[in-house]
Image (cartoon, rainbow, N blue to C red):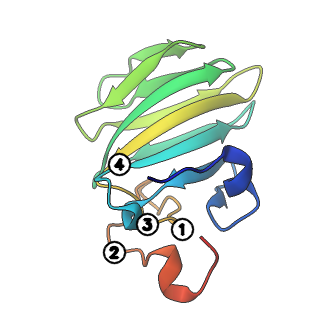
Amino acid sequence: MIVRTLQDCENTSRSVDGGTWKSVRMLLADDQMGFSFHITTIYAGTETPIWYKNHLESVYCMKGEGEIETLSDGKVYPIRPGTLYILDQHDRHLLRATTSDMEMACVFNPPLNGREIHDKDGAYCLDQAPLGQTGVDA
């Protein structure tokens, strides 16, 4: 059994700052569950271009408000507490937090290794070394 708290993970290398967001990666590939689980904060007043071409993601909004825009068709969907969106088509999208930070619970498949940040396309690469392989705390 694995037991971790958000507080346990916040001040370790499991907490990654991406500029417009911060992601606390509580469950990672090396936990061998087949997915990763993160608590991600999207900062108010920001817009983040994202394209998870290598991953599928589901996101549940726990706090805050914003919107997601799918770039293929320009559709804009509101996000508020209780909203779940699923990126099942490797959708290119813009994620915006409007008046307050959004706190999101995110699940990735395949799982992330831990240090990933968005590349120039807004994607995570598949070959990022796991946290434990570099001696960085997990």
Q: CA distance from mark 4 to mark 1?
A: 15 Å
Element assignment for label 4: loop
Q: Is residue 64 above or below residue 18?
A: above
The quarter of the picture where residue 61 lies is: top right
Q: Position of residue 88 (x, y in %)?
A: 25, 33
Q: In this figure, which residue is indicated by the disc labeled 3?
A: 113
Tag 4 residue = 52
**How far from the left and from the top, in percent, is residue 10?**
72, 54
Mark number for residue 127? 2
Q: Give the alpha-carbon distance from disc 4 to disc 3, as whole Å.
A: 15 Å
Q: Amino acid at mark 2?
A: Asp
Please give left or right for residue 23 compared with residue 71 in the image: right
Which amino acid type is shown beneath numbered disc 4?
Tyr
Q: Residue at x 49, y 25 (%)?
A: 60
Which of the numbered marks, if any, corresponds to residue 115?
1
The residue lying at 70 percent from left, 65 percent from top is 12
Q: Amino acid at mark 1?
A: Arg
Distance from the alpha carbon under mark 4 to that under mark 2: 14 Å
Looking at the figure, which quarter contains the C terminus?
bottom right
Mark 3 burial class by Cα count in 10 Å: few <14, some 14-19, many 20+: many
Total numbered labels placed on residues in the image: 4
Residues under labels 1 and 3: Cα distance?
6 Å
Q: Which residue lies at the image location 67% right of the left edge and 56% below the top edge? A: 9
Q: Are marks 1 and 3 in contact (CB under 8 Å)?
A: yes
The amino acid pointed to by label 3 is Asn
